[in-house]
Image: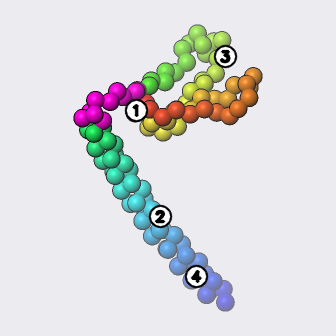
Amino acid sequence: AVEIKLREMHELITEAKVLTGVNERLHKALQAEAERRKILHNRLEDLKGRIRVYVRIRPLSSTETDRQCQTTLTKEDKRTCVMAIDPNKAGGPKSWEFDQI
C-alpha cells in the first residue's frame, strides 16, 4: 500500500513538472503575442494620427526621503500605474493605463 502511494506521488510530481513546463511555454507565447499585438496596435494608431501618453515614475529624492515622504505611485505592469490610498480620503487605490511607463 505504501509503495503504491509512493508511486502515485512520483507520478503526480512528474505530471506537475510537465504541466509547469507547458505553463511556462504558454506564458512566453502569450507575452510574444501581446508584444506583437502592441506593435500592430501602435502602427494602427500611427496611421490614425492618435496621440500617445507616456508616464515616468521617479524615485523619491533625498530631500523627500529625509522628510519621510512615501511613494504614492507604483508601477503595476508595463502599462499600468496605481496610486496608493490616501488615508484622509474615502475610496480605494486608483489606477491608470498608459501606452508605456
Question: What label sits on residue 8 in the rendered view?
Answer: 4
Graded by Cα atoms within 10 Å as few (under 14), some (14 to 19) or many (20 or more), the crowding at tag 4 reads: few
Is residue 94 or residue 18 the one in the foreground?
A: 94
Is residue 50 or residue 42 the one in the foreground?
A: 50
Q: Which residue was labeled with disc 1?
A: 100
What is the CA distance from the residue labelled 1 to the residue labelled 3? 29 Å
- Write down the region rendered in magenta: 45-54
Up/down of 22 relative to 89, above or below: below
Q: Residue at x 63, y 83 (%)?
A: 5
Graded by Cα atoms within 10 Å as few (under 14), some (14 to 19) or many (20 or more), the crowding at tag 2 reads: few
Of the two numbered discs 4 and 3 in the rendering, the one whose residue sits closer to the viewer: 3
- Of the residues under marks 3 and 2, which one precedes in the sequence? 2
Q: Which residue was labeled with disc 2?
A: 20
Q: Amino acid at mark 4?
A: Glu
Please give left or right for residue 19 compared with residue 44 in the image: right
Q: Quadrant of the C terminus?
A: top left
Q: Amino acid at mark 3?
A: Gln
Secondary element under disc 2, as helix, strand or loop, is helix
Is residue 28 among what the camera can see? no
Q: Amino acid at mark 2?
A: Thr
Of the two numbered discs 1 and 4 in the rendering, the one whose residue sits closer to the viewer: 1
- Of the residues under marks 4 and 3, which one precedes in the sequence? 4
Of the two numbered discs 2 and 4 in the rendering, the one whose residue sits closer to the viewer: 2
What is the CA distance from the residue labelled 1 to the residue labelled 4? 48 Å
Q: Amino acid at mark 1?
A: Gln
Is residue 60 among what the camera can see? yes
- Of the residues under marks 1 and 4, which one precedes in the sequence? 4
Please give left or right for residue 91 compared with residue 40 in the image: right
* Rendering colour mode: rainbow
Is residue 78 or residue 95 the one in the foreground?
A: 95
